[in-house]
Amino acid sequence: MPSIELSPFPDVIQGGMGIAVSTWQLAKQVSTNGGLGVVSATAIDSVIARRLQDGDQLGDIRRAFAHFPNQNIASEILNSYFIDGGKEPEIPYLDVPKLSLKPNALSVKLLVISAFSEVWLAKEGHTGAVGINALEKIQLATPATLYGAMLGGVDYVLMGAGIPTQIPEMLRELAAKRFVKISVDVASAKKEYLLNFDPGLIAAPDAKLSNPKFLAIISSHALAAYLAKDEKTRPHGFIVEGFTAGGHNAPPRSKDSIGGDGQSKFGALDEADLSKVAKTGLPFWLAGGYGTPDNLIKAKELGAVGIQVGSLFALANESGFTREIKDELLDQIRTGSLSVRTDPYTSPTGFPFKVVEITGTLSEQGKFLDRSRNCDLGYLRTPFEREKGGLGYRCPGEPIATYEFKEGLALDAERSKCLCNSLMADIGLAQIRADGSSELPLVTLGSDLVGAKELVKDYPNGWSALEVLDYLHDVH
């Protein structure tokens, strides 16, 4: 298999952390300064809708909307969600339509223009490359989101949390503005289910589309070999992510996968053989525990182009975490009290999830038990085929009785937390409930804190994205 020229690729890729921790502001700073800045695609329609309901105070979203190639759609979305001056703090946000196999037109248009605006803003005013990070687990948003990102000129698409076999071909079809259909994972399915997307719905015949490079986020050399062997599934490169990375991790491969402390337990079986990844002939980056200058050098010695770094950028001033969360995290890093658990049950996806133990968040068992369970955002809902026919959607984060009614197992739901609502709270977009309470955050971060401990010595009150890049490149 022919190798790919490495020189056009950046040696530092900023993590695509969702929901909207990887903001356009963060991605823009990274891309302007020589790295690959990445915006998060996760729940981007809800993020944009809530920012509009908060009044789009600086006018950034409306500025991006003014460049969208179909102004009728831009006007429709503004009329649906924009509130001049912002909603009153005690008023709940208007939710967006839930994802489904048969989405309504508003849902599709909102996904497209939301992804467009986030990418467009990240690319505004410079010539650096910008990527977008999506989750394979959220298939129902994928075609419309990636099409919107391509309209915005996105240079890279990154995807993990699953096996993204359909993405390379989909990107080629979308670049040609052709009708696409993808096979969707449906539990208990006796037939194939397809999600259709028609670029014609956006009605932008003169719009120029980017043809982005695709980087698959993987944790095993076997998956790298599988994806690389066929042109239809072959990405342009890989991000090889280790189990210290924040957010979701690949499930441990050992049968003895949960340790005595109740955390997911990883070992040698969970480490990719980089020599086998290199044999694919495709460029790769290393992620999870590589966020130091020495590890950037080490990664290159191991044959990688460079590294992907999440936690250092999540703590940067430009990230989407609220200032309160950043200050709490920095304080705990300074004092050495930060505790990150790899919880096997927290995420509705069934994947292990890194959780920072912080008072006043859903990491506290009492706060979790006090919360009224609901699934009003629904990004992690799973389609399933009912025993008597027809399609339904369920999530372990919804009320347990509801989940059982939908043929789910209560055991899967009892310890599952609502990531959609808690991650929205992480970025200051928490939903307001009928009793006046707000959804609580649940914070994730990587468990390797060496780089953060070094940076906090020089920047005790926080740092910028540029200072992260300078640190990684050992610029003094």
Image: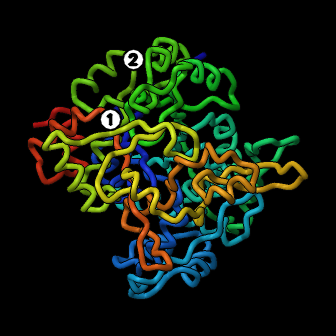
Above or below: residue 436 compared with residue 131 = below
Kind of residue sitting beneath label 2: Gly
x 51%, y 41%: residue: 345
Q: Residue at x 43, y 88 (%)?
A: 84
CB under 8 Å between discs 1 and 2: no
Q: Position of residue 55 (x, y in %)?
A: 41, 81
Of residue 67 and residue 216, the one placed in the foreground of this image is 216
Q: Nearer the viewer, residue 373 or 125?
A: 373
Q: Give the percent coordinates (x, y) of residue 280.
A: 56, 17
Q: Visible in this render: residue 41?
A: no
Residue at point 56% right, 50% down?
Answer: 210
Among the 4 quarters of the image, the one containing residue 23: bottom left
- The residue pinned by badge 2 equals 303
Pick whichever of labels 1 and 2 is earlier in the sequence: 2
Please tell me the numbered disc located at residue 447.
1
Work out whether residue 392 can be spotted: yes
Percent x, y of residue 452: 21, 39
Q: Residue at x 66, y 48 (%)?
A: 139
Mark 1 and mark 2: span between their CA atoms? 24 Å
Residue nearest the observer in this picture, 280 or 434: 434
- Mark 2 Cα shell of 10 Å, populated few (<14), some (14-19), many (≥20): some
Going by the image, does 108 lie left or right of 365?
Answer: right
Marker disc for residue 338: none
Judged by depth in the image, the label closer to the viewer, 1 or 2, is: 1
**Circle 1: residue type:** Ser
Question: Could you tell me which secondary element the residue under label 1 belongs to?
Answer: loop
- Which part of the image, by quadrant, shows the N terminus? top right
